[in-house]
Image (spheres, coloured by chain):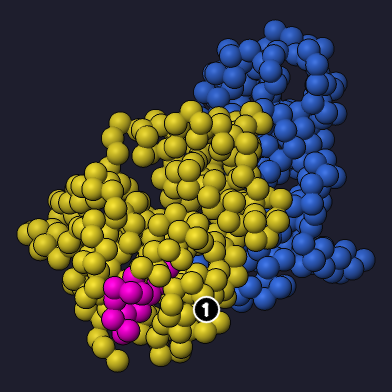
Amino acid sequence: MTEIKTIGVVGCGTMGTGIAIVAARAGFKTRLFDTRAQALAQAESQAKAFLEKSVARGKLAEGKDTEIMDQMLSTTQMTDLADCDLIIEAVFEDLAVKHEIFSQLDKICGPHTVFASNTSTISITEIAGGSGRDDRFVGMHFCLPAQLMKLVEMSAGMKTSSDVFDRAWQVCLAMGQQPVRTQDTPGFILNYFLIPWHNDVINLVDQGVASPADIDLAVKTALGYPLGPLELLDMVGMDTQRLLCEAMHGLTHEPRAACPPLVKRMIGAGLLGRKTGKGFHSYENKKIFGA
Amino acid sequence: MTYRIFQQGESFSFPTPHTFTEQADSSQAAAVFLGSEASQAYASHSRDLGSAPFVLIELLDECLGVHIGDENGPTNVLGIARFRLGSAEPTNLVELVRKPWTTDTAITQAKSSLEGAGLVVAICHDFPGRILNRLLRPYYNAALRRLDEGLANAQDMDATLRMGLGYPEGPIELLNRTGLAEHFKVTQALYEQLGQEAYAPARRARTAWLRQQSEEG
């Protein structure tokens, strides 16, 4: 089996950018692909700012930030992913979109390339089924913010070969992450609990039980959580939360997973969270977490 | 601003001496009612408290409305509940419960007194479970149910939630530490008040409570 040296990341949103940082920081040649040139430029700028801050905080050696950025190629051409040994897709939660991306990649990449999805709700087996290589397909769900959180939920699809899964597991370790094996069930472990919990918090705000600031203060103080749930939701973004809810609720019909009305109203008002400068809280800049 | 304390029965929020209870002054007009029978104590003093800067009543699972009504009650009376999970020590977080008609002055002065004793105050309106129990109990029930269904073992479930979200403790280890039977009591009370399935006690919690009942004879 070919050693994995080059990692491609598809989608330069919050998750994709974070995963690209993780891969490049671990010494892998990294290709960050997105069709949106402006979004790619922003992702590069966010990655650069994060790495510079890491140096300033003593987490990285002087000059290492430049070295890592040199490892990372941003591109709007999917063909630039042809030499990747592993490609991690991190686009929004839409099965048809993911199938379209993987079917294109299947034509571009060599047979050795392993495909992975960062999906947090959609079945790995279902995505793999439209990838053209369901035996070389794994689930690699990074946690937000990926550049800081170590956990990766790893799932095999029904046809994933054990060798491919083991290789992906080893790459995960080589990236400095902590993989945990999960079942290929909706939301795996983390989002099975997180999506309904976030919806409960959003409904609490909508019902006027308490202000976002008081809810976050209560949760952080009483439970020792590093982030309040509404601070975390502002990082996730209301648009993403809606997609997560639709995917999760569509699969489970769990009432607590249904998208809260307030999410739809906030999307309508452009209050998406950090990415638009205002969600449940207000933000002065669009830097990614930790930058 | 200081206050006098009327304690009747054991306090869930302040089971042991705390700066908040120690700095009380019986000559003050502001009043705090603590203990499992705070309701009765408040009822016997309520006529004399109209001019008090603020009045606090310790709440357990009940709403503030149980003590002062849900329409046009006294403007200076608030509920307090220091968050505590089962047998664990109380946290520093106090939920300060207001009504729509509660004056800003009473809220500000009560909050200031609590913060002066080193407590952190979150203000909320008068709903069953307030902020924390309202949010946490469905999460704990779901974790217990998924454990029964074999989503993952307890260690993996706890480790995933700790590492993935930075939580200091996973739900299963936390419930085992603080008491599954205690979780049953709170979530059952909320289930009765809210009527929502998510609050219906999970099997493991009900079993723990039944075992506790059996052991206590």
**Which residue appears at 40% of the width and 70% of the height?**
A103
Q: Residue furthest right?
A: B217
- Image coordinates of residue B212 in percent, x first then y, are 83, 65
- Image coordinates of residue B209 in percent, x first then y, are 82, 63
User: Quadrant of residue A183 in the image?
Assistant: bottom right
User: Quadrant of residue B75 in the image?
Assistant: top right
Side (left or right) of A138 relative to B10: left
Colour in which chain B is drawn:
blue
Indicate whether residue B90 is drawn in magenta.
Answer: no
Which residue is denoted by mark 1 in the rendering?
A157
Residue flagged by tag 1: what amino acid is it?
Answer: Gly
Depth check, front residue: A88 or A45: A88
Colour in which chain A is drawn:
yellow
Disc 1: CA contacts within 10 A as few (<14), some (14-19) or many (>=20): many
- Image coordinates of residue B163 in percent, x first then y, are 45, 64
Answer whether residue B193 is visible to the viewer in this image. Answer: yes
Range drawn in magenta:
A105-118
Q: Is residue A63 above or below residue B119?
A: below
Depth check, front residue: A90 or A188: A90
Depth check, front residue: A290 or B8: A290
- Image coordinates of residue A234 in percent, x first then y, are 44, 41
Q: Is residue A236 above or below residue A134?
A: above
Answer whether residue B92 is visible to the viewer in this image. Answer: no
Subunit that carries the residue with mark 1? A
**Which residue appears at 68% of the width and 37% of the height?**
B130
Q: Secondary structure at mark 1?
A: loop
**Which residue appears at 25% of the width and 86% of the height?**
A3
Q: Is residue B88 above or below residue A206?
A: below
**Which residue appears at 77% of the width and 32% of the height?**
B63
State the quadrant of the N terminus of chain A: bottom left
